[in-house]
Amino acid sequence: MAKPKKRYVCQSCGSLTAQWAGQCADCGEWNTLVEDSGAVVTPFQAKHNLQGGGRMILMSGLDADVPLPARMSTGIAELDRALGGGFVEASATLIGGDPGIGKSTLLLQAAAKMALAGKGVAYVSGEEAADQVRLRARRLGLGNAPVQLASATSVRDILTTLGGATPPDLLVIDSIQTMHSDLIEGAPGTVSQVRAASQELIRFAKERGTAVVLVGHVTKDGSLAGPRVLEHMVDTVLAFEGERSHQYRILRAVKNRFGGTDEIGVFAMQTEGLTEVGNPSSLFLTSRDESVSGTVVFPALEGTRPVLVEIQALVVRLASGATPRRAVVGWDSGRLAMILAVLEARCGLSFATSEVYLNIAGGYRVQDPAADLAVAAALVSALSERPVATDMVAFGEVALSGEVRPVAHGALRLKEAGKLGFARALAPAAQAKEGNVALSGFRNLGGFVDHMLGR
Ligand code: TYD
Ligand code: MG
């Protein structure tokens, strides 16, 4: 047999290379390449595979009967909503988020509720001692829930323990980075270990009908669980977002083989754990003073739910020739650069000698492209020091040409804004009126800027 070639796997993004290097060519991280001893298919084996020897697989048409996947409600409506109706039997779900954001709290609450509802639930923590988890459950008022709890990190031990006659309905693994598979070498948390441990747990889920939930920590660039390979392996990926210093948390489906990815769950972190926020539309709004420039309300849409958020911009003119800073919290910095460039090239506004700061209030993260026009409004207002009226909202997508484009669900945005007392909206020209919100429509950013500056 040919000697397997050496290969190196990046611990940050999971990409493979034949040659060791100090920097990963794919993700740009330094010192992340580690030798990997994965199985290699040699040419002899590959030829053998083509010559048969496997079993026949059953093939059938697309129209064959399909039973809908059985779902288990978690007893937490906001979590059910993000999942598309609850955990699916025989599936694997990855829930990722920054350390301290509340993943363990959320899953402990869900585990307890499901156990109280009669489901078999196992919670394995590799990060905390069992007593620590117990104390937390007691503090959350869930100490009496019949959850089977253990502190363990060996996947073989966990599966041996739970693989008996009645495997649990739900198995929570907190976190996948602490798990160790003895099928391969390497320390827990490395890409190959995370991959191997996940593979074993996912196989267990599929074979025994258990819904397995893996907790994963995100890396600093925001990708889930370090190795992105994990996202491909599981059925559902949920991201738990928010700023630790703020109360509100958003649970977002990033991938869902059993449902849509356009719904979110909204929670508030309180002393009694995570509480559900059923109607989040006015959550991120603060009452503000008429005279503040640079602040604009944007009617964002999360799935089918409108959420009104406040966008704040600050433009500081620099006296010296120093390179001006651009800082963004809660929005895409590339998108900000684009809006600044369009304002500069198409509308004659110059930000070249000014520092620009953009913030989404309340720790909210905007991903909706309709925010472009609201951001432009905040920037123009900050630059010109002309406040935007407090009863005004703004939305619309801005193209590189300066064109203001209509966005999805404009009517829904206006309806919610109207409900919350907003009377006027800056919107794309094609937007139809809805309710009693007065519209100012714009075809391009030039006309919009003229309107804002009263030209
Ligand atoms: P945790 O669930 O441990 O986060 P993760 O598993 O994502 O790392 O929760 C972390 C924070 O939540 C912790 O710093 C304190 C806070 N917290 C509350 O404010 N109230 C509570 O009831 C609980 C359990 C935690
Ligand atoms: Mg935790």
Image (spheres, grey):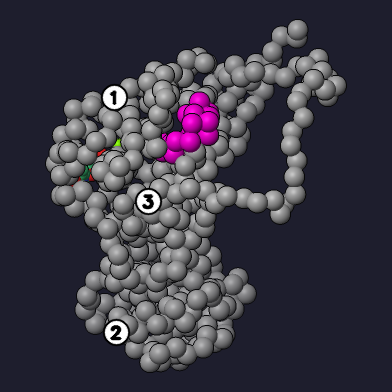
The residue tagged 1 is 151
- Residue 258, how many percent across, how many down? 53, 51
The residue tagged 2 is 421
Q: Main secondary structure of the magenta part?
A: helix
Distance of label 3 from label 1 (alpha carbons): 25 Å
Distance of label 3 from label 2 (alpha carbons): 35 Å
Helix, strand or loop at label 3? It is loop
Please state the quadrant of the image where ligand 2 appears: top left
In the image, is the residue at mark 2 within 8 Å of ligand 1 by its beta carbon? no
Q: Residue at x 19, y 42 (%)?
A: 142
- Residue 256, how many percent across, how many down? 52, 50
Whether 413 is drawn above or below 8: the answer is below
Which comes before the other along the chain, label 1 or label 2? 1
Nearer mark to the viewer, of 3 and 2: 3
The amino acid type of the residue labelled 2 equals Gly
Nearer mark to the viewer, of 1 and 2: 1
Q: Residue at x 52, y 85 (%)?
A: 431
Q: Residue at x 51, y 88 (%)?
A: 432
Tag of residue 73: 3
Q: Residues within 10 Å of mark 2 (few under 14, many from 20)?
A: few
The amino acid type of the residue labelled 3 equals Ser
Helix, strand or loop at label 2? It is loop
Which comes before the other along the chain, label 3 or label 1? 3
Nearer to us in this view, 280 or 222 = 280
- Highlighted magenta segment, given as a residue range: 199-214
Q: Please indicate, yes or no, whether residue 176 appears anywhere in the rendered image.
A: yes
In the image, is the residue at mark 1 within 8 Å of ligand 2 by its beta carbon? no
- Residue 184, how many percent across, how many down? 52, 16
The amino acid type of the residue labelled 1 equals Ser
Distance of label 1 from label 2 (alpha carbons): 51 Å
Q: Residues within 10 Å of mark 1 (few under 14, many from 20)?
A: some
Residue 324 figure quarter: bottom left
